[in-house]
Image (cartoon, rainbow, N blue to C red):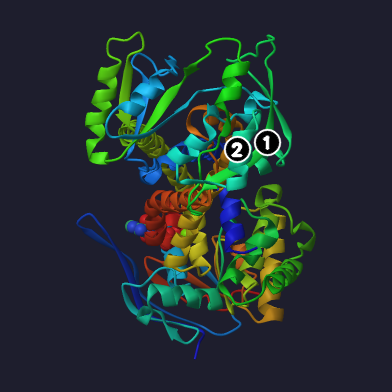
Amino acid sequence: MSGMGLMWANLFRRKTRTFLTLFSLLVAFLLFVLLRAVAEPFAGGGVSVDGADRLVVTSKYSIIDLLPLSQLGEIQRVPGVEGVTHQTWFGGNYQDPANFFPKYPVEPRAYFDMYPEFAIDPAQLDAFENTRTGIVVEEGLLARFGWNIGDRIPIQGDIWSLKDGSRLWQFDLVGTYRHRDPGEAAPVALLMHYDYFDEARSFEEGAVGWYTVRVSDPEQAPAIAGAIDALFKNSPNPTKTSTEAEFARSFAAQIGDIALMATGILSAVFFTILLLTANTMSQSLRERIPELAVLKTVGFSDARTSLLVVGESVLLCLIGALLGVGLGASVLPAASVVTQQFMGPVSMSVDIFVQSVAFAVVLGLVVGALPALTAQRLRIVDALRRG
Amino acid sequence: MAIVDLSEVRKSYVKGREEVEVLTGIDLAVEEADFLALMGPSGSGKTTLLNIIGGIDSATSGSVQVSGQDLAAMSRRQLAKWRSENIGFVFQFYNLLPVLSARRNVELPLLLTKLSGKQRRSNADTALEIVGLEDRARHKPGELSGGQQQRVAIARAIVADAPILVCDEPTGDLDRDTADEILELLEILNRDHGKTIVMVTHDPKAASHARHVVHLDKGQLSTGTDEEAA
Ligand SMILES: Nc1ncnc2c1ncn2[C@@H]1O[C@H](COP(=O)(O)OP(=O)(O)OP(=O)(O)O)[C@@H](O)[C@H]1O
Ligand SMILES: [Mg+2]
């Protein structure tokens, strides 16, 4: 037996009480892990401010409403506009809805001109442009699904069906793209040829999801956005144009609210856990006063006795934390399937693990501080007399 | 020099405005390898005196020399270490830790030594053998009889090789036969292992196992009955 063994044995003197406390610690740390995992992708600004020189043109009424392709030429002619291209939401599943990632019909060359931060091999871009059923994907998808260049990739359409009424789209994988900066990740997506998509689909021919516009002078972006919207104000398809940076800002503001809410929930949960665990520890201490006196009698110093008590409390919190973190790590992959659809994947990180452990230690120290002080000050003869 | 040497030891408690003097000038010398029984009426200060000898309580005044150390001059931390090396305690109600097995209870004082885990366990087993409980090493106190628990407590008191045992009514909670067994064990420890024993008891039959008996009454020792023990 060691000092550790002694703490361990003491911890489980009242099994039910210890298990209940462990359970509440587990729940608290599970919650911590899940909320941190959700908040983490947005920590530190998150959204890139790339593309202050890009505008996004959507339907005025709803982002889901489509716009006629005929607007492209008109936008192109607005003074200050340097380039225009368009994208559409495809939806669809590869094998299983759980394998979610966005898929967009695009204009191959115009798309990569619009997003110079994405790198693609020139030969692959040529192949993309020249293969009607060609697609390129973010390079991480190859490993994720075991794809190779040259593979035929079936996608089950949900929004879009083919002219023959079927929904099984077949594409040929001709290339991959990545972020030009090796330290950054490009958004995960599948890009297909708009021309093929438009020709093959059974309805809404000639419609696109939204336009992306590059302006020559970012300072002029608001004025140009106004000019574009004025152009279509009285048409059947009025538009709403905003800068990508604005998009990012409003998005980040919403995330800020979420982070604040998560912090609030966590504070409340941990305050409750603090009281609960503190109660467990002080109850267990009160029962044990004569035993602590015995330890001191046989020669345990005041410091050593109080260390045993605080160690026990840290041990309790650590076990609870590890159980919670373990459970969190095992449910996150499942949670990720859901969250991926609207905010990207969530996962357990080393950071979250380290934070949890640090949190558990601090919690244990706070909870154990008062009992430890009591143990430290305990006078042997008084305690023995009481027992 | 005597292994326990008290002179002019006084102990008083302040209760409210009143000061109650429990020990009023105790002179006591216990030679090495002696077995002393300390008798006296309830409330006469026997436990108080024993605790002062064992270094878990302090005298209000007077000199307390045990194992050649002046206890009044030591800090709490020094006293704790000194106790672990010099004193084995045996209480009336055994005072074992209920969550630990017999072996682990006995091992407890060894956690303060530099012994390896293996050595600690083997020393604990030896101590359990001496008290005749080697086959109960894995039992928790709740699974042992009173007499067995007291044997475990005695094993704990001797495991670190302390030369002095202080026992506060070690048989007070036991029936006659079991009490006799415990007293015989103490006699063996005194006779064969050279332990100096100071034992508080109410029971004249228990006191008869000791080499000497002293009486404490009204804060004073009377040593007139020195050689009445067998
Ligand atoms: N902490 C204390 N505060 C005040 N009075 C105390 C304290 N401890 C002991 N006393 C008093 O000191 C006296 C001696 O107590 P002690 O426990 O030494 O007696 P004892 O001889 O061991 O009695 P018993 O045979 O009942 O165990 C008692 O009157 C007791 O009330
Ligand atoms: Mg007493």
Residue A61 image offset from top left, x and y in percent:
35, 13
- In this rendered view, identify the residue nearer to me: A227 or A257: A227
The answer to which quarter of the image holds residue B185 is bottom right
Q: For disc 2, does the CB lie below 8 Å from ligand 1? A: no
Q: What residue type is labelled 1?
A: Leu
Residues under numbered marks 1 and 2 in contact, where contact means CB atoms less than 8 Å apart = yes
Q: Mark 1 points at which residue?
A: A173
Judge the density around disc 2: few (<14), some (14-19), many (≥20) Cα neighbours within 10 Å. many
Q: In this view, does A375 lie above or below A222?
A: below
In the orientation shown, which residue stands out farthest toward the right? B135
- In this rendered view, identify the residue nearer to me: B226 or A51: A51
- In this rendered view, identify the residue nearer to me: A375 or B32: A375
The answer to which quarter of the image holds residue A172 is top right
Q: Is residue A288 visible?
A: no
The answer to which quarter of the image holds residue B46 is bottom left
Sequence order check, earlier mark of 1 and 2: 2
Q: Name the residue under label 2.
A: A137
Say which residue appears at 56% left-offset and 72% top-offset. B112
Secondary structure at badge 2 equals: strand
Residue A381 image offset from top left, x and y in percent:
42, 61
Q: Could you tell whether A333 is left or right of A110 in the image?
A: right
Which chain's residue wears label 2? A
